[in-house]
Amino acid sequence: MYLKNLIKFISIFSSLINLSLTGETIELLNVEDKKNIKTNDIILTKKFFHKNINDQSQKLINKNVDNILGNSNIKNIENITKNSPLLLAIFSNSRKELEIQSEIQSEENNILNAEGNVLVTYKGNILKADSLVYDKTNQTILAKGNISLNIGKQLFKMVSLKYDFKNKKGYLLDVKGLIKTDNLIDDLFNNFENSDIKKNEILKEIKKNKVRYSPDSLENWIFYTDKIQVDGNKWTSVKTILTNDLLELKQVKIEVNSLEATARQEELRFKSSVNFLILDEKIHIPFWFGNRTLTKEISYENIWNVGYDNIDKDGLYIGNKLNSINIFDNFTLDLEPQFLIQRSLKGYTKSFVNKGDSITGDKVKRNVTLKDYFAFNSQIRGQINKWNLEIDQQNNSFDPEKISDASRLKTNLSKDIAFLNSKWNKSFYGIYRDRVWNGSIGESEIYAGYGSKLQKQNSWVSNGISNTEVISLGLANLKGEALNSKNLVKSIKGNFFYSLDQKIPIKIDEPPNLFVDSSYNYVPEPIKKGLSLNRKLELLYSYYDGGNNQQYLGIGAGPEFIFGDFKKKSFDYTKISIFPFYKIKSGDSLFKFDQVSDKFTLGIAFDQQLFGPLILKNSATLKVSRAKDYIDFINSKISLNWKKRSYEFGIFYQPHNEAGGIAFTLFGFK
């Protein structure tokens, strides 16, 4: 996640890379009384001044301009520019214009000097500075002192900026920026010719005193660097720092070294040397992102993937996601080679059945060769007539003799459609050897199949109650392991599913507002303490070949307790939830993977702050059987996390399916 947003910020300077001016001038400003004066490349206009200065200053300018209009042989306007409190200079050709507004302007030897509240606009982008020098002959611009640059919703501040329009070279010194990644590509490549300067004025500061958590997005970032060198369509920086910590700028940082970026229309290619994820200015974790390409359509997963899968990969493994490959228009190919660490150390595997046995047979211990030490994941993504296509393929061995047992495949073609006055997702899918965890039945597979699904999900809040509703209709032709044998069976399956989840506040201590400041060291938002009731309703009906069907009505409700503010050093946060769920069920499936077998379950979750940012998280689902008088864990997860306001890092393990890994999350603010 964090590198996705790191990549986005790089594009911002491409707007500076493509600047060019010819120095040619035409009359651009039309005023109603036509009383404007054009001398070389400087235009003075009454109408503009009238909107920006007081009446006394306006009278002075009007007088000066009228004197100019009465004199057809004007040789020097330096006296006017020095006496006018607010002046405007425009340099343009038929497609681009550079406007410079300031309190004092003077021109000598074709060099314009502007001082005092300098405001520069170019194609709708806005720059403010204390002083600016524009050399019309050499076509260079130099700005100094308290520089602020506004491009769409992006904000940058720097000490100095210099750019040569002829040679397309320049630099930016001591740069700090506050960027909004969701608008970044649009801001860079859109034309803001009709933008309103008043709406775009730079009023906000980069570092915040308080921020608000944005749970569904991570789009606001601060970055800073000592110097950015621009050369044509390429810019470089020795070291750039990026952080999502808008308050203190120190909880988490991403250090990018030897950064080199090349900008093209709606595309950015970049590379760097070794980079570092810096936590609390103490822990430096190296990472690489190699050569990357960023476009407007961004899809990202972490480059390095460390995980644990005892079913398919015999334990610990590591993977590296390679740079996306553009196959053809609107289609990309993502590749991830993996090295199976634990399988290579053991020298054997328990992920496959005996040679020649059915795919549903028991997995056995088999010797391995070098070809079994490696695995491979691939994904193809694209659009076909506004339908989104995804093809995910997984190989858990390079041994040709194991290819059918080592491969898994999923395809999905989906699109949002309007149906019954609301938005639904329509999808068509195909699968080969899809793993399914089915509670107390355990691991099972859909060997092969294809089908279609229509689904709608809706969330809303009413009278303080949070609601999430899901409706799903499906029809498929499937082949999988039989319910009561190892044989493969094939059947048509149709199903209807409905669920409604609710969170009802009982006694909640609402925080006075949703903002956090630097005193919130461990959490991204104020804790809502108290007691609430979680409630769920589920309905399912499925039918199969031969008149077979199964259905259930599920009802559950349970309390959730939250104590503490998570601001003190230890034991200042506890979360406990208990959720019993009961299914009234009839009928049976033909398959093992979707048989409803756990009639009564008990969900338990417990989170506890231990010391500082260290928090223990546990969750489990237990099957409770009255007939056999026993309790069995059918789902479970335990994790130990380091939780801060700006990020959370944790190690987790899921005993029920022998899987685990490392989780890292960055939190977004606005």
Image (tube, helix red, strand yellow):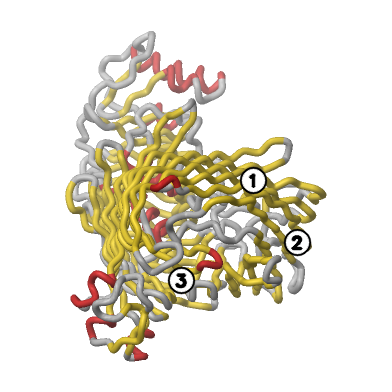
Q: Which residue is mark 1?
A: 537
Count neighbours of disc 3 (C-alpha within 10 A) and say few if under 14, some if 14 to 19, many if 20 or more: many
Distance between the Cα atoms at labels 2 and 1?
31 Å
Query: Which label sits on residue 565?
Result: 2
Residue appearing at x 31%, y 67% in the figure: 321
Picture layout, residue 535 above or below residue 323: above
**523 and 656: which is toward the camera:** 656
Q: Which residue is mark 3?
A: 277
Closer mark to the observer between disc 3 and disc 2: 2
Residue 336 is situated, as x and y percent measured from the top left of the image, at 29, 68
Residue 75 is situated, as x and y percent measured from the top left of the image, at 27, 25
Residue 376 located left or right of residue 254:
left
User: In this orientation, does residue 1 appear?
Assistant: no
**37 and 588: which is toward the camera:** 588
Residue 166 located left or right of residue 258:
left
Residue appearing at x 39%, y 81% in the figure: 314
Q: Amino acid at mark 2?
A: Asp
